[in-house]
Image (cartoon, grey):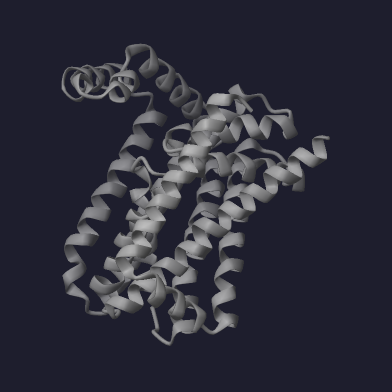
């Protein structure tokens, strides 16, 4: 591992821990620890199993796109790449490359061939989050929660935007002028104040990104059944990632309906775009707010439930990724 990458990972971990510490300070460490200690361990532990199963579904989605048989070693490689994605401050941008490179070391599939699959998996993950959240919102609307109508409208618009982009990719719409036009606008505005934005909007960077999308488009057009199967696995993974909210609510004695969890967990996860590893701090706060606003959960209980959900879906997954990285290194030795 290069010194630059090691430094980036160390800084990422420190940033995540700082964000978590700030979150705990705002909530109150003593109250948070005391409440977590009072949880019923049996239902709470089911949340960790659900998170592990969700990661398995994500790996099966990528396996379907790569058209390879699931293997334990390849699953370790996937978790290792995902581990790097979660640690790096810009992991959601670099995630497909990290996972493709990690999978290459085990499967023998070149990064050039694996990258389109990881790009599609990443896109399916974002589309899946809005799809599951939209389904949860519609179910709540059907149950009489009319206040969620604007939320459902926004989620429907985002889903339509994702589908429109997918259709445009499949249909072969020339995205180059649009992408370069947006890049030029970014360089002339935000790029004047941020070197990162300027570098991301550089014409060469945009061309490389468009090339990745071209490869992904060919994969979609050549075998759409594999893409549909992968998306189905992603949807299952989002339902499983939402279950820890339900199991933690049971463990705390504060029921959280699955429909509420299907809205709160995927929507708050969209904050992973912020430049902090795993969106630590912002995701917890947003999730707690959604539990209060959508589910009518008590504020203090909502904070504890959000924290416990993240224990299952982020910190536990991070532990799995670190363990997989260690095991993969040991197997290579």
Q: Quadrant of residue 25?
A: bottom left
| Residue at point 47%, 77% (across, down) | 36
Q: Is residue 146 left or right of residue 28?
A: left
| Residue at point 58%, 74% (across, down) | 46
Image quarter (top left, top right, bottom left or bottom right) of the N terminus? top right
The location of residue 185, given as percent across then percent down, is: 18, 20
| Residue at point 36%, 40% (across, down) | 275
Q: Is residue 255 above or below residue 91?
A: below
Which is more toward the observer, 175 or 296?
296
Residue 63 visible: no
| Residue located farthest toward the bottom when viewing the structure as drawn | 253
| Residue at point 43%, 49% (across, down) | 16
Q: Is residue 169 above or below residue 85?
A: above
The location of residue 62, given as percent across then percent down, is: 59, 42
Q: Quadrant of residue 282?
A: bottom left
Q: Is residue 69 left or right of residue 298?
A: right
Image quarter (top left, top right, bottom left or bottom right) of the C terminus? top right
Q: Is residue 1 left or right of residue 132?
A: right
């Amino acid at each position: 591992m290069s010194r630059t990458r090691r430094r980036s990972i160390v800084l990422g971990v420190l940033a995540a821990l700082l964000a978590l510490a700030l979150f705990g300070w705002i909530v109150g460490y003593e109250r948070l620890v005391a409440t977590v200690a009072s949880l019923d361990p049996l239902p709470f532990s089911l949340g960790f199993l659900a998170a592990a199963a969700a990661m398995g579904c994500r790996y099966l989605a990528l396996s379907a796109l790569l058209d390879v048989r699931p293997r334990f070693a390849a699953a370790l490689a996937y978790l290792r790449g995902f581990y790097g994605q979660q640690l790096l401050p810009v992991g959601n941008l670099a995630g497909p490359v990290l996972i493709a490179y990690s999978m290459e070391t085990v499967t023998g599939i070149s990064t050039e061939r694996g990258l389109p699959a990881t790009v599609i998996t990443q896109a399916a993950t974002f589309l899946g989050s809005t799809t599951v959240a939209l389904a949860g919102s519609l179910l709540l609307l059907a149950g009489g929660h009319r206040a969620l109508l604007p939320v459902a409208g926004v989620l429907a618009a985002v889903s339509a935007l994702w589908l429109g982009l997918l259709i445009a990719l499949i249909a072969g719409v020339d995205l180059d002028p649009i992408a370069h036009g947006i890049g030029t606008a970014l360089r002339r505005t935000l790029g004047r104040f941020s070197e990162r934005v300027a570098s991301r909007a550089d014409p060469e960077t945009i061309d490389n990104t468009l090339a990745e999308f071209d490869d992904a488009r060919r994969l979609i057009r050549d075998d759409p059944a594999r893409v549909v199967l992968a998306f189905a696995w992603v949807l299952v993974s989002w339902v499983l990632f939402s279950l820890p909210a339900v199991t933690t609510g049971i463990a705390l004695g504060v029921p959280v309906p699955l429909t509420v969890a299907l809205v709160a967990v995927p929507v708050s996860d969209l904050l992973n775009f912020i430049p902090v590893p795993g969106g630590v701090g912002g995701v917890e706060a947003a999730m707690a707010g959604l539990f209060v606003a959508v589910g009518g959960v008590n504020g203090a209980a909502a904070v504890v439930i959000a924290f416990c959900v993240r224990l299952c879906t982020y910190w536990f997954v991070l532990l799995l990724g670190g363990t997989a990285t260690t095991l993969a290194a040991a197997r290579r030795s």
